[in-house]
Amino acid sequence: MSHRIQIVEDERIVALDLKECIRSLGFEVVDISSSGEKAISRARELRPDLTLMDIHLDGQMSGTEAAAILRQELDIPVVFLTAYAEENTLKAAEESAPYGYLLKPFELRELNATLRMAFSCRAAEAETRDQHRRLQMAIDTAKLGIWEWDNQQSTFFSQGHIQQLTGILPGTLRDNAPSFMRLLAKTDRDKLLTMLQQRGQAEMVAAMQRPDGESAWVELNAKQFEGQSRGQTKLVGVLRDVTERVQMEEKLRQASAVFHSTAEGIVIVSPQRQIQVANPAFLRMTGYSLGELLLQDIDQLFHERQHSSEFYQQLGAMPHGLWNGEILCRRHGGELFPVWEHICAVHDDSGQLSHFIVACSDISGIHNAQRELNHMAFHDALTGLGNRHLLQEQLEVELDRALCHQQPLGLIFIDLDGFKLVNDSLGHAAGDRLLQIVAARIKETIRRADIATRFGGDEFFIVCPGSGEEECSKLADRLIAKLEAPILLSDEPVVISCSIGIALCPQHGVELDKLLRAADSAMYEAKIQGKRRYCLFNDQMANKVRMRMQTEQHLRQAMNRQAFELHYQPLVALAGQQLVGFEALIRWREGERLIMPDSFISIAEECGLIHDIGEWVLRSACEQAKAWQDTYQRPLRVAVNVSARQFAAADFVRKVGIILLETGLYPHLLELEVTESTLQIMEDSQRVLGELKALGVSISIDDFGTGYSSMALLKHLTIDRLKIDRSFVKDTPEAVRDCAICRAIVTLAHSLMLNITAEGVETAEQAEFLTKIGCDTAQGYLFAKPLPQAALARYLADWQQQQAAGK
């Protein structure tokens, strides 16, 4: 078939003459166009094998522009036939990558040679493309990563599946070593370099750590070769992912190891039931040697009661033939013993029965496992105590026994105080260790007749047969003392207390569910009363539990309708009685009723609302402080209490930074108040405080002196202020001990270059005493109660007038 040629020539006579010349050479002319636009349109329709193009044409488009489009978009080769040979014309023509350039006037033989050479180049190009496509298909089929390393130029070139294998983008990179080598294990990297130095080539399987952290195995082939320049040495190589193969080989090795080392007896049997191989466990189980077993009929040799003659035939006919069951077997000496036997029919790729696999275990091992499973079903895996199933079962038994013999029965419910915060702060591993230590202490404290169980999480029940109110109360006291001993989970000791509820049979119930609910209600009462105590159930407690549930629901509704407001209590510098700032205190308004935070913050922490409430408080306080700054042009700081759960949140520092940025408040005007107990149980509290200090925020320890190990806190943590708890201030200056404590705290704070604030100052005598001992600032009813917005506005207006008057 002759080649099809398109002519693009704006001179009609020249085009027709050219057409006759081309036909005389044996080619077919499919189109004559006079402009580049028309040539492109016709080429899309006719798809010629080659376009013969003049450079200067009718229309807006030149021949070189049209040729570039034909080449790039339609992949049609172009030969220029033109009278122009200027330098700029040649450069423009070169950009379209023509297959030839023939100057007018031309001889027929020149045209013939140019066209034939163009078609020859086109054929060679097509062959090259086919070869490249076949090569690419081979690379894709084998999923190869191709690479080349030029040591002198420090360039690494890669293509193929290199990105899937190594994470390295294909193309050329500047690097001082083959980029993928950093992903190899050091031993494999050294081995590769040694092989290349000694032999100039390498073939190996190497372990690779991908950038995403996943481990993989690659088959690596590399070889040195001489570059184009004299003395230039390059490396070329391929990578192939063989992770699946290595894993399969490892599985085969593991299977072989399992076959030889497992305690289960395994035998490979031919379709005719003849033993072909047996593992060591089977030899030990039966007492036979391998030589005595080979080619023996397993049914006759091993089974006391043989399967029917059709059994193996029917099993082998099934696509996935499998049988298991208990069967009586014989050892070498004739001893009978029961085994649990699995028989599996194995077929080859063509579906023909290949062999049977017989696996058997001594039934006594199964019985042991069953006993272990029964133990696991009724015991907690973490602590070793009984679980809720054992609690229900044993409590039912003890209730029946107590009622039958008219004996007392006590039920103690223990809930750890603050366990979730420890778990969130120190991690689940530390939380699990804490639960194990608590369980061990419970077992050390109870009587032998008592039954200790872990109900779930940080909740424990103790069933106390024969115990009344007195015995259970004494046990609760011992448990509280035992459990609050410090526990070393990290660098600092952790102190955790518990709340205990006690329910008695028959006083509080004779049914399991009623007694459990009574103990639960009593435990919640202990929580409400301040934790670290026990409570004996009474009827009013159940009502309190219901009220707590209602409070939680109302609290969620209050959050949705924004029923909270902030009151502000002034912070006063004792020397000069100057206002320095305010402490923001949250209130919950329900109609005309104003609810104090003591009534709902603990519930908010338990139900998880504390994060949303705390963020609202922080944002509102910062907005208010920014308004003070803009209105009064005075640096009035605002102090905000931060709950333990809020402080322990992973994104707390980020949220503080965002709120400061969005409200525009200077960071040094924000002071975050954190309790000692919060800092004591957080392993990374030093890091969190450091990040807050980096923001420019001030940190104060609230209720200082009421926690455990305060000196350790001051030693390690970066803080700015101590706040003397109101319990130390309220009886000063009359109470000598309280005065001594206040004086010691002030001295300690000043020695450590810390500021000091006293809380709960209500009398002039208290303020005078605190001033004398060097206390910096104070807050309390002596200066003002917490002020709602209207009262706050009046207070600040009066203060501004005093400032203006110079008072």
Image (spheres, helix red, strand yellow):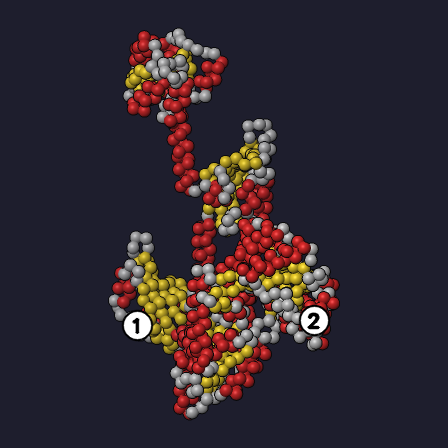
Q: Is residue 177 left or right of residue 130?
A: right
Image vertical order of residue 271 relative to residue 518, above or below: above
Image vertical order of residue 27 relative to residue 701, above or below: above
As measured in the structure, the alpha-carbon distance from the residue carrying label 2 to the one carrying label 1 is 102 Å
Image vertical order of residue 242 relative to residue 492, above or below: above
First in residue order: circle 2 vs circle 1: 1
**Is residue 368 shown to the viewer in this render?**
no
Residue at image position (43%, 21%) is 96
Which quarter of the figure has residue 363?
A: bottom left
Q: In this view, does 447 lie to the left or right of 110?
A: right
Residue at image position (28%, 64%) is 315
Q: Position of residue 63 (x, y in %)?
A: 39, 17
Label disc, if present, on residue 765 of the rendered structure: 2
Residue type pointed to by label 1: Gln
Q: Which residue carries the number 1 mark?
A: 306
Circle 1 packing at 10 Å, graded few (<14), some (14-19), many (20+), is some
- Report the number of discs: 2
Residue type pointed to by label 2: Glu
Circle 2 packing at 10 Å, graded few (<14), some (14-19), many (20+), is few
Q: Position of residue 253 (x, y in %)?
A: 46, 57
Secondary element at tag 2: helix
